[in-house]
Image: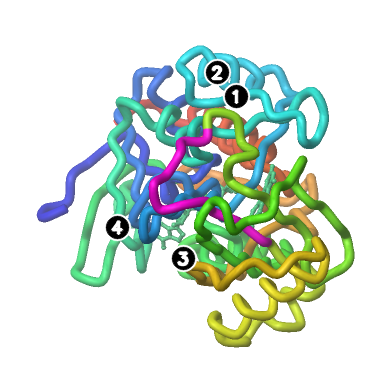
Amino acid sequence: MSSPRTFDIIIIGSGMAGLAAAGVARSAGRSVCVLDKGRRIGGRVSTRRADGFTFNHGAQFLTARQPDFITACESAQAAGALRPWHVAGRDAFCGAPTMRNFPVFLGDGLTIRQQVEITGITRDNGLITLHDADGPVARTPQVLVTAPAPQAARLLDPVAPDLAATARSAAYAPCWTGMYGFAAEDLPGMAAPVSTKSGPVGWACREDLRPDAAASEAGMGLVVQAASDWSETELEQDAASVASVLLEAWQEMVGATPPAPRYMAAHRWRYARVIRPVAEDAPRQTADGMIGIAGDWTAGARVEDAFMSGHHAMKSLLATATPA
Ligand SMILES: Cc1cc2nc3c(=O)[nH]c(=O)nc-3n(C[C@H](O)[C@H](O)[C@H](O)COP(=O)(O)OP(=O)(O)OC[C@H]3O[C@@H](n4cnc5c(N)ncnc54)[C@H](O)[C@@H]3O)c2cc1C
């Protein structure tokens, strides 16, 4: 953004929490803008395309149990952006044709600016200014911060120390994710995703197991996610060696040694799954209602928790302020 614009509400983060919150603000008739440092919408509900392969390398599926989230999922399903995928029970879904299609659906029609990293928040005369490395980006009477807890804490320190302290009480487990592209005929068949509790492999899935998975001329993608404890131990390893180790572990697990993959990479999710959300009675917005927080770390470990946290946080912010 070249010159700072003013919105009724600005949301930092275009993950599930930010998108749910933006939807609530829009429905209430507020002007809302979502800012995100990533290249693409969705945060950890993420899909990577590389060398013609597709890898759903973040959240693998989602479950819908709460009425407002079920409603959002039904709309996405009607639009073809979500499909039932009973890998984890009757209430499990995956994005269609990729996981990212779900956040893309939720973000439709919203004002969202990707590749804007907020580095500072200041407040002056009843207005909040958000800054990136080049200076002021946008102004607003109300901001909702949905970045993962450690990043949120750094942003909140100068302007909302109580909320920063809330953020510091949350904890995450990391997740190393290996992505492998094979010639389709080289990859052993798989009846269902592999899911185990002990590492190194915690989950493995051929991309064509997903409903609506699009065929690719390049071949077939395989995603191997490491178990949390293994990811923690190997957190500072280099990505190339993690990719090799996870591939070997998966081969041993399935008892097959296919030819070397055509594509191989590993992604480190430093803040993957929440293992300790903040306390239920911890503050979630400033007393004046100018700054709020949301994100899975305020609610639980799942996509649905993140969505519902944004939904509730925005309702609460709207209840404490009038439009600018
Ligand atoms: C490997 C993995 C597997 C998972 N598997 C599942 C699963 O199977 N089922 C399930 O329900 N959940 C799963 N999860 C958890 C689920 O993905 C998350 O709980 C949920 O997506 C979190 O949403 P969020 O909006 O809270 O955060 P995020 O998705 O992390 O969104 C936060 C956004 O804030 C942005 N941001 C951060 N700092 C700044 C800044 N300074 N300026 C601008 N933008 C910023 C980030 O770019 C990001 O897009 C998994 C997660 C991972 C990583």
Q: Report x, y in % for residue 16.
A: 54, 40
Which mark lies nearer to you, 2 or 3? 2
The crowding category of the residue bearing disc 4, from other C-alpha atoms within 10 Å (few below 14, some 14 to 19, many at least 20), is few
The crowding category of the residue bearing disc 1, from other C-alpha atoms within 10 Å (few below 14, some 14 to 19, many at least 20), is many
Tell which residue pokes out farthest to the left in this image: 2
Numbered circle sitting on residue 115: 4
Q: Earlier in the sequence, mark 4 or mark 2?
A: 2
**Residue 188: quarter of image:** bottom right
Q: Residue at x 46, y 39 (%)?
A: 215
Numbered circle sitting on residue 83: 1
Label 2 to label 3, Cα distance in Å?
36 Å
**Element marked by disc 4:** loop
Label 3 to label 1, Cα distance in Å?
36 Å
Q: Is residue 60 left or right of residue 221?
A: right
Ligand 1 near label 3 (Cβ, under 8 Å)? yes
Q: Which residue is mark 3?
A: 155
Is 218 a magenta residue? yes
Q: Earlier in the sequence, mark 3 or mark 4?
A: 4
Q: Earlier in the sequence, mark 1 or mark 4?
A: 1
Q: Tags 4 and 2 in contact by the CB under 8 Å rule? A: no
Which mark lies nearer to you, 4 or 2? 2
* Magenta span: 213-224
**Residue 251: quarter of image:** bottom right
Q: Residue at x 53, y 29 (%)?
A: 212
Q: Is residue 229 left or right of residue 297?
A: right
Q: Earlier in the sequence, mark 3 or mark 1?
A: 1
The crowding category of the residue bearing disc 3, from other C-alpha atoms within 10 Å (few below 14, some 14 to 19, many at least 20), is many
Q: Which residue is mark 2?
A: 77
As shown in the figure, which amino acid type bears the numbered disc 1?
Arg
Residue 161 can be seen, yes or no = no
Numbered circle sitting on residue 140: none
Q: Earlier in the sequence, mark 2 or mark 3?
A: 2
